[in-house]
Amino acid sequence: MPQIPEKIHELTVGQLSARSGAAVSALHFYEAKGLISSRRTSGNQRRYGRDILRRVAFIRAAQRVGIPLATVRDALARLPEERTPTRDDWARLSADWRAELDERITQLGRLRDHLTDCIGCGCLSLENCVLSNPDDVFGERLTGSRLMPERRDG
């Protein structure tokens, strides 16, 4: 991984890409979505502050666990603009996502534990399916296969 000398306070898009592991196109996308920002030189080239490295790492980590980019953008908007975010800043943001991540972990565990049964089952029954209807929660409110939108002919 290329090292950036301490005296360099701004990075080109290529340097940011090499250091962060994110493709240049991804960095442009993040900027277009308001997740990161740059300044433009007199030659209209992008320059990123060194603190953007941590923001990109945060964005990529959030994406890996399935956090929507809109949620990431809202979180990043709460970070300080003029300094590199601290460990406490990141801890505060990530704590907000704990419940959502716990629910995803539960769903993934259920999928893992029942995927073979589901593929081999062939029931095509939303009423009995342990993946789409865990613990038969819909059976308490509805009868039949009403989770699917009703089709109206004619």
Image (tube, rainbow, N blue to C red):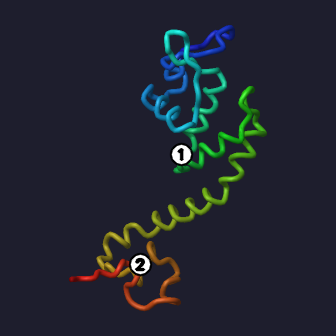
Residue 70 drawn at (x, y percent): 55, 48
Work out whether 56 lies above or below 66: above
Lateral position of residue 68 relative to residue 49, left or right? left
Q: CA distance from mark 2 to mark 1?
A: 31 Å
Q: Residue 82: which quarter of the image?
A: top right
Q: Residue at x 51, y 35 (%)?
A: 30
Of the 4 image quadrants, the one containing the C terminus is bottom left
Neighbor class of circle 2 (other Cα within 10 Å; few <14, some 14-19, many 20+) is some
The kind of residue on which mark 2 rests is Cys
Lateral position of residue 127 relative to residue 82, left or right? left
Work out whether 104 lies above or below 37: below
Which residue is most to the right? 88
The kind of residue on which mark 1 rests is Leu
Residue 123 drawn at (x, y percent): 31, 80
User: Pointer 2: what residue?
Assistant: 129
Residue 112 drawn at (x, y percent): 46, 63
Which residue is most to the left? 154
Q: Residue at x 58, y 32 (%)?
A: 36
Work out whether 94 lies above or below 46: below
Nearer the observer: mark 2 or 1; the answer is 1
Neighbor class of circle 1 (other Cα within 10 Å; few <14, some 14-19, many 20+) is some
* Of residues 106 and 96, the one drawn nearer to the viewer in this rendering: 96
User: Pointer 1: what residue?
Assistant: 69
Question: For numbered disc 2, what is the local secondary structure?
Answer: loop
Lateral position of residue 54 relative to residue 115, left or right? right
Residue 62 drawn at (x, y percent): 57, 44
* Of residues 28 and 39, the one drawn nearer to the viewer in this rendering: 39
Q: Residue 76: which quarter of the image?
A: top right
